[in-house]
Image: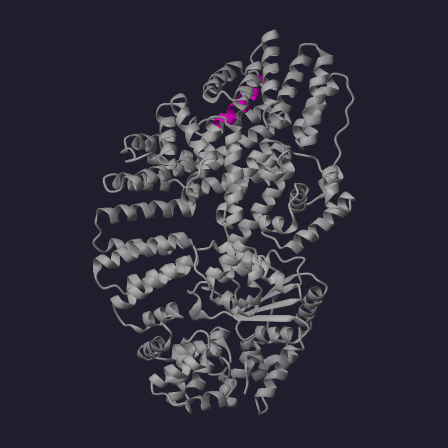
Amino acid sequence: MRTRSEVTPALLDRQRERAALDGLLGDLRSGRGRVLVVRGDAGVGKSALLEYLAGAAADMRVARAVGVESEMELAFAGLHLLCVPLLDRLEGLPRPQRDALGVAFGLREGDAPDQFMVALAVLTLLSEVAEERPLLCVVDDAQWLDRASAQALAFAARRLLAEPVGLIFAAREPGEQFRGLADLEVGGLPDQEARTLLQSVVRFRLDEPVQDRILAETNGNPLALLELPRGLGPAQLASGFGLVEGQAIPARIEQGFRSRLETLPADTRSLMLVAAVEPVGDPVLVWRAAERLGIPTSAAEAAQTDGLLQIGTRMRFRHPLVRSAVYSASSLPERRAAHWALAEVTDRDRHPDRRAWHLAAAVLGPDEEVAAELERSAGRAQARAGMAAAAAFLQRAAELTGEPAPRSERALAAAQANLQAGAFDAATELLAMAAAGPLDELQQARAALLRGQIAFASSAGGDAPTLLLKAAKQLEPLDVVLARETYLDAWYAALFAGQFAGAGDLHEVSQAARSAPPPAGAPRPSDLLLDGVAVLVTEGRAQAAPLLRQSARVFAEEEITMAERLRWSPMAVAAASWVWDEECWHTIQARELQFCREAGLLAQLVIWVNSTVTLAVWRGDFAVAASLIAEGEAIAAATGTRYPPFGAISLAGFRGAEAEAIELIDAVITDARAAGQGTGIQYAQWVSAILYNGLGRHEKALAEAQAAEQAPELHVSMWALPELIEAAIRTGQTRLAADALGSLAEATSIGQTDWGQGIYARSRALLRDGEDAERCYGEAIDRLSRTGFRPELARAHLLYGEWLHGEGQRTDARAQLRTAHDMFAAIGMQAFAERARRELLATGETVRRPTAGTRDQLTPQEAQIARLARAGMSNPKIAAQLFLSPRTVEYHLGKVFAKLEITSRHQLRQALPDSGHDGPMA
């Protein structure tokens, strides 16, 4: 009996592919992790290569899984199949990971785990198993993995380095999750090998032109060469298999299998159909369903004899295309009967979701009982963090609902689930289904809210604020709590949209929010935020200051629910910046960063990592910022999350790396303009102003700062004012600088903090003369020295030194300029350091350009790991925080020690500078 591995003899001559796989095994035996995606058309020999690989790994532990098309809607189905043999090591995982994986696999009760905590648990599990001997994980037909499994495995794959773990995927066309992983493309056989294989199948002599045509049409595909000539005579072969010209190879192969099926007895075809719709290949289940359909056990003989079906501990088709051929060759009533029989014999307690899916495929029209079963399955999927699966169950439930009102309600629920799963097009279609039925006022408002949320989640562009504002107004008389939350959503959307917000701009949203009903009881954190931001726009900073300060403090100091933290903390950070509260800003960020890391909430973590970069850059912690940027990029790649690289452009701008900064700035502006995100453009303009002030090109800095300052209600506009003032003074535009200073005075007065007042004093000094200017510079230096904003302090010394030089006080100027230069050099602000150096040279002092130290040779990830180790964190704790394995952390520390020429963790304190932020910032 032939199986999918039957073509192995033909494939063993593939020297390139075998060499790649042998090299992979060699790396595993040497203790290094490897990942490989084997890709190619159906029938090209991917499975045979996997068989070769597994056979050559006799000294390793091998775990296997196969993606099944009919299980793509069942969350973690593929991952469970791969990990079941490894679960003896589950109890050794850290508790959060153990609980997450246990809940995902239905082994224990608990709250829905974050899917990326599940992924981290898989990484740790694979690493633990590989402690004994190398582990080889082989996943065939990866294109049919369910989304949750694919994400988890791709996440683990990107973090395998120092563990002897191999993850090998075979797929016709790898999904988005596997993009960027090392791959091995398998093409057709070389000409001579293809001819040899063809001659082994065709028992009569073929003319050379006929052979050439067959080889050209099959493109050397081994399965096509084995299957397509079967049962055909010379005339048929000469005419090109008697198939349609131009038909794709997989379609030709499937058609060949269908032709073979037609010669089998009816009972055999019925048995094969039951096996085709049973996803896991359980022979007991298949035979029980066959019995209900009156199919005798003898029906298996013809399928086995023909080599199309193998029956053992599992029922396996010769190739997935056989399964496809069986299903496509059957009639709709035959398929429904097979699904119904399987539903009848599937244990409703052990596999309720699989049973519900079979029932859904078995019914012809609306069926309330089955729809209710699917709703319950959706609830279980959500409890396992399988949002994509929940969305599929709810959508099918809506389709099977006959009564218009319940159908619309289920369509709304399915739209919500698809939104959460990131399937925005499906969510929009389901909203249209809901709107086709009767919706009461609350349902209409919920539908409007979903439209706004879809618009914001898909692009964060200009349409979202207007849609959310409309929804909030509809909700006011129906649900005050939800209405106020929606106003806050609309305000946040308008903040992002900026100049593209249109009718739903911040003024419009704020006016509407001010007239909204007050909260019924004690104000919640979101209520405080809404009141603060609405007053900020409608009445000004002075009136908003107490509300903004209170709301920021609540998020920094009080215990609030996880849902509120995840949803509103980014706005609380903005509130802290509006009142110039550095401590509160840092506390909220550090708190949320730690929370998201401990909970494994990677989709939220990437937001906080990027947000923290801005504060790290402003504090002059460029090594921290660079490592966080690398971490954010890795998380974004693993999760598929797209987030504007605000942190990266701020680091490049502060560094003064013009070419790098301009490339990033231009990309951000282009993307933001295309998406209708005004805040992205404004942020990039602010960074550009800093860049050009550092480079001494003040005309350019002035233009960029003016553009960034044009939206006065946004915090970025406040940050742009000091750049505008400096650039205006340096270009002789004193009136413009004076007007901007008035705006800065109003902006900084509401906080009365050393940060805000220090910036204001430094800017005020630029417009003062004599003792007044000197007093302002002294105040700026005194105040800013009490903050963590080292770049701002260094710039105060620079401006003071430049002023002293202009006043003819060379000795005093040199002291200030030397301090500024040394600070800029230590921080890594190249452009400002060069500006200070040039001014020092003008005073007659000689100064060398700074050179890179050994620590600058560390990669961002090495620097991050080194800092955490310096702060006293153990390898397992570092691994958990950075979503790595302990062995990978150990590997990186080894490289750190070599570069720094040290031998122990204790020496890190001497080898690395103390930024003062090792723990919280990282």
Quadrant assignment, res 155: bottom right
Does the segment drawn in magenta span residue 388? Answer: no
User: On screen, 229 above or below 391?
Assistant: below
Q: Which one is nearer the viewer's eye here, 325 or 773?
A: 773
* Placement of 703 over or under 47, stated as above or below: above
Query: Seen in the image, is 3 located left or right of residue 836?
Result: left
Q: Residue at x 57, y 92 (%)?
A: 204
Q: Where's residue 499, x and y in %?
A: 41, 33
| Residue visible at 52% across and 34% down in the picture | 587
Check residue 723 for magenta coloring.
Answer: yes
Q: Quadrant of residue 287?
A: bottom left
- Between residue 405 and residue 88, name the one nearer to us: 88
Image quarter hosting the N terminus: bottom right
What is the quadrant of residue 184 in the picture? Answer: bottom right
Q: Is residue 229 above or below residue 160?
A: below
Q: Is residue 922 left or right of residue 812?
A: left
Dominant secondary structure of the residues highlighted in magenta in the image: helix
* Residue 518 appears left or right of 575: left
Q: Quadrant of the C terminus?
A: top right
Can residue 168 be seen? Answer: yes
Q: Which residues are magenta?
A: 717-729
Q: Is residue 645 visible?
A: no
